[in-house]
Image (cartoon, helix red, strand yellow):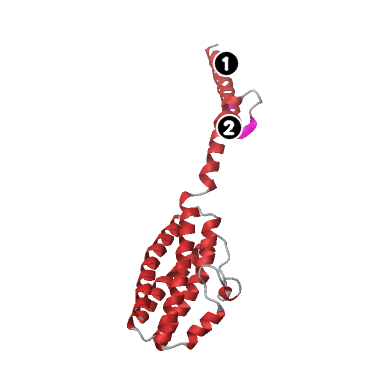
Amino acid sequence: MIRKRSLVRRGAVVVAAGAAALVLAACGGDGDGGSPAGHSGHDASASPSASASVPASASAPQGQHNAADVAFAKGMIPHHRQAVEMADLAPERARSAEVKKLAADIRKAQAPEIETLSGWLASWGEEVPAEDAMDHSSHGMGGMMTAEEMTALENASGEAFDTAFLKMMVKHHEGAVGMAKTEQADGAYAPAKKMAAEIITSQSAEIEQMNRLLGEN
């Protein structure tokens, strides 16, 4: 008789445990999206976490850029390339030591910026301007020299080169400063805006220096 009661009790425990397991499984199923329509508590807890992940993954503040940043990089690359090309003529053609040093400083500052600007465009999935881009579409933009002006500079030497180089580079720098001011006003990418500020500061100072040298000639 005692043994029979014990077996009955054990059977009741097993049944209770099985029922509890079924309840837990049902609750766990709600989290997987299998809850009935009336059980909105689990759906509400899942929905905020899903929606919260959208803004977080949309864009990282450090990497934000806009169309103005792209235009700045695409415009400044050929602009800098031409300045470097002009500066490379100075060592053999200039007479003034100051003009030669100025040309070297321009090359030293702008050549690395070309690499930086190209890297930004590549990271944004944008096309980097071709090496000959300035020969096709950039004339008249931002103080760019025409092919005829570049040829005249290549054919000059001595004092004539110094004068032509300074006049052209003043115009070239003024164009770059204008482009940089546009980037500061309209751009969103912090490193590009920082470069623009540096261009405004350095090239404005060089414009003053070149105008002084022109006044001395």
Q: Which residue is mark 1?
A: 8
Q: Is residue 41 left or right of residue 99?
A: right
Task: Using the image, determine if residue 92 lies above or below residue 19.
Answer: below
The local secondary structure at tag 2 comes to: helix
> Which mark is first along the chain, 2 or 1?
1
Q: Determine the residue located farthest toward the right in the rendered image.
A: 37
Instruction: Check if residue 28 falls in the magenta segment.
Output: yes
Discs 1/2, front: 2
- Report the magenta stretch's main SS: helix
Task: Please state which of residues 155 and 135 is positioned toward the viewer in this rendering.
Answer: 155
Question: Mark 2 and mark 1 in contact (Cβ < 8 Å)?
Answer: no
In this orientation, does residue 150 appear?
yes
Residue 63 pos. (x, y %): 48, 54
Q: Residue at x 40, y 67 (%)?
A: 203
The part of the image, by quadrant, that contains residue 87 is: bottom left
Q: Which residue is mark 2?
A: 31
Labels in figure, total: 2
How far apart are the alpha carbons under marks 1 and 2? 36 Å
> For the N terminus, which image quadrant?
top right
Task: Using the image, determine if residue 111 lies above or below residue 153.
Answer: above
The local secondary structure at tag 1 comes to: helix
Check disc 1 and give the amino acid type: Val
Check disc 2 and give the amino acid type: Gly
Q: Residue at x 60, y 34 (%)?
A: 32
Which label number is shown at residue 169? none
Tell me the crowding category of disc 1: few under 14, some 14 to 19, or many 20 or more residues within 10 angstroms, Cα based: few
Q: Which residues, given as a range, are shown in magenta? A: 27-34
Residue 49 pos. (x, y %): 53, 36
